[in-house]
Amino acid sequence: MAPENQEFSSKWNNVVNKLSQQFADGERLDIESIMYLIGIQELGKGYQEFTKDDKVNLMHIAICCILEPFGYYKYEARDEEGWPHYKLIKDLPNLSPTAQTKLMQEAIILYFNNTL
């Protein structure tokens, strides 16, 4: 494994392990679960029961939030119910599933860089 891939893998595993310990009693969280947690964090209302539509919206919030530093989205405002809204700035590139996962992992690492 190339050193940069080993470093990336180490950073990713560090984020997953810390979140898994904190939120899943050590059971390894997958990327979708981590995105869901980010969505809840960004909504800022704490954990509560969410409808299926709310869960989809939380995932969308997470995607917009973590991809904002990469220039894909820009935060606009919160609506009357407190949900954040983002504007698409530039289209995401057409990526293979593997490259898409790596982009999301890099964005998640960046998101948690200063909080874990």
Image: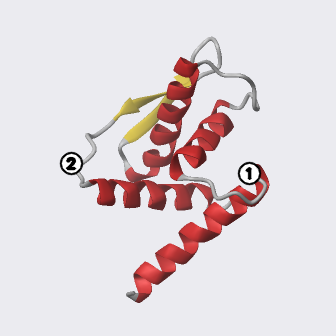
Where is mark 2, residue-wise? 94
Where is mark 1, residue-wise? 24
The reply to whether residue 14 is in sight is yes
| Image vertical order of residue 9 relative to residue 113, above or below | below
Check disc 2 and report its element: helix, strand or loop.
Answer: loop
The reply to whether residue 116 is in sight is no
Callout 2, which amino acid? Asn
Q: Quadrant of the N terminus?
A: bottom left
Image coords of residue 39 (percent x, y)? 59, 36
Image coords of residue 29 (percent x, y)? 62, 54
Is the residue marked by circle 1 packed among few (<14), some (14-19), or many (20+) residues within 10 Å? few
Check disc 1 and report its element: helix, strand or loop.
Answer: loop
In the image, 3 versus 29, the foreground residue is: 29
Q: CA distance from mark 2 to mark 1?
A: 33 Å
| Image vertical order of residue 57 relative to residue 64, above or below | above
| Image vertical order of residue 84 relative to residue 26, above or below | above
Is the residue marked by circle 2 packed among few (<14), some (14-19), or many (20+) residues within 10 Å? few
Which residue is pictured at 46% across the width and 61% down the height?
106
Q: Quadrant of the C terminus?
A: bottom right
